[in-house]
Image: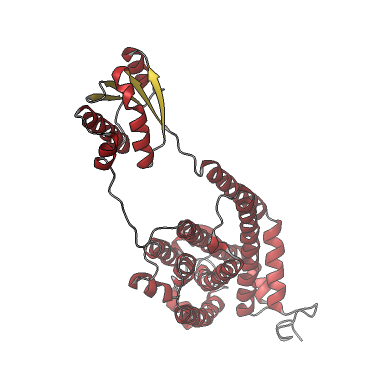
Amino acid sequence: MTARSAGPVGARGLPTIVLVARHEVRMRMRSRVFVGGTIVMTVLVVIGIVAASLLAGRTTPVRVGFSGDSQALERSFSATAKALGVNVSLSDISDVTAGTAQVTAGTLDVLVTGSSSAPTAVAKTAIPANIESALSLAAEAARLSDAGLSPAAIASAMALVPVQLLQPPSAKDNENLFASLALGIVLWIALGQYGNMVAQGVVEEKATRIMEIMLATIRPSRLLAGKVIGIGLVGLLQLTIVGAAALVAVRVTNVASIPALGVGSILADIFWFLLGFLFYATAYAAVASLVSRQEEVQSTVAPISVLQIAGYLLMYAAIPNPSGPLATVCSLLPPFSPIVMAVRMAASDVPLWQVALAIALTLASIAGLTWLAGRIYSNAALHLGTRVKFMKAFRG
């Protein structure tokens, strides 16, 4: 009895799919690409979070110097700038020439000269709009004071127009926006990276004729399934390591609470990664089996890459309006749902029926694509040399 006729169980009593997947996991995890890539990704993510924590809430104050009679504006200017949300640092400049030299040298942003009712602002290139507004309001208050108005009347005349927001943005909204954007980018990179890894592995085995030896004992469909599962587990492990490092860095630096990265949300993100990987990796393996040289891989998988890029671009349309018609429709389409639906779920509350429909359509697409990929893979795997046409591989 041959190994192929022995059925789906290998020599050690394990299913052949498990044996192939285990082989892929061991081989990929021992490679320098996996180890080095994991270290680099983890370090970059941690550095980015630490840098964000150092810069969070830190705004460089605008350095403003007052010279001569304009120094009478300092108190009014400082209060107005604070009301406008501008961080300023004030200093007294005894000499206009020295103050101008400081502006030229870049140690002073704005120099105010002249009288309190008719000041002049000196800057190197441009004056921030809020600084100009605060200075104009301070000068106008000085003119009203010179006209004889009382401080209470001046305060009433100079009061800013109150603004009432019906739906004011919250820190949670901003953190959800950050989390959804980061999630979409990570999913897009991961799906492309591991999908290409599957394609490269298929062509490598085909070019070195290792595939011929493996197909002598393993059915093509099981070989394809084991390869996809093995590389998917490696990708999931790498993302888990990077994600754990990111969560630890966020917790230590306290840069954000990121409510969109709760335990349930993380599990949902992993689920969408698995669905997206199964969808794209199977397609990558099918089209990669049509060629026999590594330099032909990129041109062969280009149509699949275009779909991934489209999903990445649609992500930016979904983030500003997660409940809009475009985001809703695209999140239900299988080529785009692993990215767009995951982003929508991170950015807002998505109706349960839409999530269920997207999952059902994606699973149905994976099932159909698995059948198609198995057929193409079986018919094209042993054809070496020239590229096999898609319809020829489909018809067998």
Residue sitting nearer the eye, 172 or 45: 172
Q: Residue pushed farthest left? A: 147
Residue at the (74%, 83%) spot, across then down:
2
Hey, which quadrant is residue 210 in on the image?
bottom right
Hey, which quadrant is residue 124 in on the image?
top left
Left or right, 369 with reference to 86: right
Q: Position of residue 22 (x, y in %)?
A: 71, 69
Location of residue 79 with respect to 353 vertically, above or below: above
Residue sitting nearer the eye, 3 or 152: 152
Residue 325 visible in the current orientation: yes
Q: Quadrant of the N terminus?
A: bottom right
Location of residue 373 with respect to 132 vertically, above or below: below
Left or right, 307 with reference to 161: right
Q: Position of residue 167 (x, y in %)?
A: 37, 62
Residue sitting nearer the eye, 117 or 229: 117
Q: Residue pushed farthest right? A: 12
Residue 333 visible in the current orientation: no
Q: Position of residue 125 (x, y in %)?
A: 30, 28
Location of residue 82 with respect to 249 vertically, above or below: above
Q: Position of residue 214 (x, y in %)?
A: 67, 73
